[in-house]
Image (tube, helix red, strand yellow):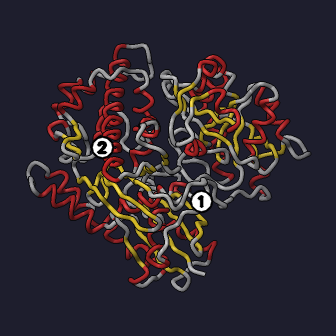
Amino acid sequence: MKYIIGISAFYYESSVALLEDGVVKEFLKEESFTRIKGTNTFPKLSLSFLKKKYSLSSKNIGACVFYEKPLLSWSRMTYYSMQKPLLRWKINSQQFKNIWKNGLLFDNHIKNIFNLNSSQVLFANHHVSHALTSTIYENYFRNDLNKDKLIIVVDGVGDGETLSIYTMTNDHLNRIYVDHYPHSLGLFYSTVTDYLGYNVNEGEFKVMGLSGYGRPVYKSFILENIINWNNNKIQLNMEWFDFDKNPEKSYSEKFSKYFGQKDELYNLNEIHTNSFHRAANIACSFQESLEFILSEVTKWAVDKTGISNVYFSGGVSHNSKAMAKIANLNKVKKFTVPPSPGDSGAALGAASFGNFVLNNKFISNAPLYFTNNFFNPQTNIFSDLFEEFSKITTNTLTISSLIIKGEIICIFNGGSEAGPRALGNRSIICSAKLSKTVQKLNSKVKGRESFRPLSPVILDKNLDKFFYVKSKFKHNLEWMGLTLKSKKNTSKEYSSCIHIDGTARVQILINKELFLYKLLEKLEKNDHQILINTSFNSSGEPIVFDYMDCYISMKKMNLKYLYFDGKLYLRK
């Protein structure tokens, strides 16, 4: 028995993936243990957990793979900043100050836990890790393994690269294109995220939600003056940006002068104010500029390669509106974006790379739900925190009755999801038909902005009744990979889950064994065909990981019902 470990760390959402004899067994985020959302620290707690659970040692570990090449990454970034040392002295200072806090010491970190020899420690190219993550779910999602693939990786920066394009036939991966720092679509979008007052790497999805309320009044200006796709290359006009000079600010003074000083902007919780609409117009303009550039890149790549089976990965691929735009292009005949395309998911790609090095084969069999169930309701502590709703096993009829009455249910069931989006095993649910309940869940319970709707979940057989969908990208809806346009009757019956632009990030249920599938079967008999599904966590915290997290999170959100293992519990 041989294990392969993939690790992503030191940038955002550190994570670990574990392969056992070529099969994906575990996928863990370090934030689950530290309870610090998005933590980038070396995932020693995740690794220690796996070491104990699987008795991992240097004898049964075939390879431990880091998701990028840290020396290459550091040297490329440093080389760029040193070209203008006075202008970029803050970046230079940060580069040398943090030299011992990044992947350059990965060997030491991993050897302190497993005592591996150097031949067991491998390094994958950052964008290769992303690319392999995009194809790792193929067996589970019924794709044609032998079909040629066109893989487009778009993120902020990794190993000095910002956008790369690959072709893949069977297990042969070939790079045909690359863009380098600072010309980055990811950093282009994070700049407006920073400018609008959100945290980079956390707030991009808020900008995407905000964009639905605006008009693209600055789009033409942005594409003419700030970013363009010219001569088949991404080009940023760096006069508008500061991320290459200042680690604390992404946008330049020129940016502020044109779009308005930041302190003149926005109370984004009041959607009817002039400042809100101004912010929404800026967000919309950057969103549509991003979509335009990505569309042009994709069309060029399809024409160049003749391959229309398109895969996307990298942090920008979390933008479900942009992914919907790409998926609907006429040139794209099939479209896939993985459940976890960002840096945390790259641990899976790194593990796949390790399997290729050892066994000459990439991995294509990752599950959507993992088996790591760390919830033990038999402990005395659990019984102190929760009590059974009834002494008989709670069935879906009982829970459906509560939902119809307007109750909100927390779910901790089975293994955790592969990506950042809860898909029914670490979820909070309610009826999408009861707008007051949905509003309560969104604003009071989760503390989300009013311009961000919650996501709907629906049985696959009912999807066409409420949304427009094409078969070429439908499989992505099992993990909320992109948005769909809603039909008129949906906006009337289920307006609570439809964004102002008429779209929704939909999850479909195909597996009849899932609890949510069985629950929706009961609910549709009472004309409740769509549920709201949001992640089981309180604002600013990671998704729950064990029963203590469940209790603390429920107490913070003042929720009382917890479904686990066929039973409904009440929080004491």
**Crowd rating for badge 1 (residues with CA inside 10 Å; few <14, some 14–19, many 20+):** some
Q: Which residue is mark 2?
A: 185
Please report the residue visible at 85 percent of the width from the left and 43 percent of the height from the top. 394
Residue located beneath label 1 in the image: 139
**Rendered location of residue 196, percent (x, y):** 33, 30
Q: Residue at x 35, y 28 (%)?
A: 283
Q: Position of residue 125 (x, y in %)?
A: 34, 65
Q: Along the horizontal axis of the image, is 440 left or right of 198?
A: right
Which of 282 and 460 lies nearest the eye of the viewer?
460
Left or right of 551 in this view: 247:
left
Vertical relation: 498 (above or below) 20: above
Residue closer to the observer: 325 or 452: 325
Q: Position of residue 179 (x, y in %)?
A: 25, 52
Check the picture and name the quadrant holding the N terminus: bottom right
Q: Nearer the viewer, mark 2 or mark 1?
A: 1
Element under disc 1: loop
Q: Position of residue 167 (x, y in %)?
A: 38, 59
| Element assignment for label 2 | helix
Is disc 2 surrounded by few (<14), some (14 to 19) or many (20+) residues within 10 Å? many
Residues at marks 2 and 1, CA–CA distance in whole angstroms: 31 Å
Q: Residue at x 46, y 73 (%)?
A: 356
